Every structure is written in C-alpha cells, then in structure tokens.
C-alpha cells in the first residue's frame, strides 16, 4: 500500500549530541534519512497553500488531492 506523507517544514531540526550538532531532516526529501543532506533547499520558494510532490529531483504541484 502506498502512502502520501505531507511534510510542512522547510528546514532541518538541530539536535545537540554532547558538543556536536546533528541535523535531522524535517522536509522528507533527504536521501540520508533521518539526517539532513541539504535537500530542503528545494522547498524554499514553495507557495503557501499549495501541495507539491518531488519526483526525480523535480517539484510538481499536486492539483487533485
């Protein structure tokens, strides 16, 4: 069964491990889950109120949901 999971965050979450920072992916696009790989940069110019999906690194607006 396939699932559509909606992520609204556009930046990673910093988690401190001792003196070291780890960045956790919150956008859902990282290929290194659960860690951030910088993929969230693709989301910065998304328009509020629109739903998008990312296929093969390209953003596509979902019109019928």
Image: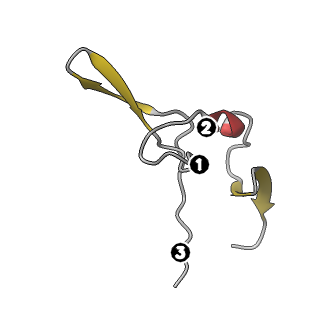
Report the residue marked by disc 2.
Answer: 40
- Please provide percent x and percent y for residue 57: 75, 50
Report the residue marked by disc 1.
Answer: 29
For this rendering, which residue is in front, 65 or 35? Answer: 35
Residue 3 tag number = 3
Q: How packed is label 2: few (under 14 Cα within 10 Å), some, or many (20 or more)?
A: some
Q: In this image, 22 relative to 17: left or right?
A: right
**Which circle's residue, 1 or 3, is located before the other in the chain?**
3
Residue 46 tag number = none
Residue at the extreme bottom of the image, as rendered: 1
Which one is closest to the eye, mark 1 or mark 3?
A: 1
Q: How packed is label 1: few (under 14 Cα within 10 Å), some, or many (20 or more)?
A: many
Residue at the extreme front of the image, as rendered: 32
Residue 22 in which image quadrant: top left
Q: CA distance from mark 1 to mark 2?
A: 7 Å
Secondary element under disc 1, as helix, strand or loop, is loop
Name the residue located 51 percent from the left edge and 85 percent from the top edge.
1
- Please provide percent x and percent y for residue 56: 76, 56
Q: CA distance from mark 1 to mark 3?
A: 15 Å
**Which circle's residue, 1 or 2, is located before the other in the chain?**
1
**Which circle's residue, 2 or 3, is located before the other in the chain?**
3
């Amino acid at each position: 069964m396939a699932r559509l999971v909606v992520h609204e965050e556009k930046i990673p979450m910093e988690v401190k491990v001792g003196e070291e920072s780890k960045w956790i992916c919150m956008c859902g696009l990282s290929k290194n889950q659960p860690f951030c790989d910088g993929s969230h940069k693709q989301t910065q110019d998304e328009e509020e109120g629109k739903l998008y999906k990312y296929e093969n690194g390209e953003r596509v607006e979902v019109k019928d949901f």
